Image (cartoon, helix red, strand yellow):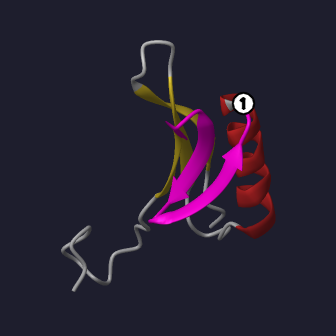
Amino acid sequence: MNFIDPNPTSERTSICHYLVVSIDGAWWVDCEGKPFGPMATKQEAISSTVKLIEAFGDPNRPADIWAPDETGRSRPVWKWEAVR
């Protein structure tokens, strides 16, 4: 059963969200429950995630990276468009 799209024959593909988070002073990236890290800085986490997506991401599935801004609120910082 597909909870994201009620029409299982739809051409839409779910977006793979990568979340950059700080835990105990280290930066981690979470993608669908799988952690990547730790990294020293937020920028290093974002850059590493871009490289990860470009090297191993599904070209048919869109992806984006969310990271906290200066207020701590998560914002989209990078987006990968699916190739169709």
Q: How many labels sit on residues?
A: 1
| Residue highlighted by disc 1 | 43
Judging from the image, what secondary structure is the residue with disc 1 in?
helix
Q: Amino acid at mark 1?
A: Gln
Asked whether, in this view, residue 55 is left or right of residue 84, the answer is right
Q: Residue at x 70, y 58 (%)?
A: 53
Percent across and percent down for residue 19 are 50, 46
Query: Is residue 28 among what the camera can see?
Result: yes
* 34 magenta-colored: yes
Position above or below: 54 against 69: below
Tell me if residue 23 is in the magenta stretch. yes
Given the current orientation, which residue lies at the most extreme front position? Answer: 24
Asked if residue 78 shows in the view, the reply is: no
Question: Which residue does the image show at 64% across and 58% down from the upper left?
Answer: 36
Q: What secondary structure predominates along the stretch shown in magenta? A: strand
Locate the C terminus and report the quarter of the image it occupies: bottom right
The picture quadrant where one finds residue 61 is bottom right
Q: Is residue 17 left or right of residue 4?
A: right
What is the span of residues highlighted in magenta in the rendered image?
22-40
Up-down relation of residue 65 to residue 34 (above or below): above
**Res. 62 image quadrant:** bottom right
**Is the residue 16 above or below the residue 71 in the image?**
below
Q: Residue at x 26, y 67 (%)?
A: 4
> In front here: 22 or 24?
24
Percent position (x, y) of residue 3? 21, 73
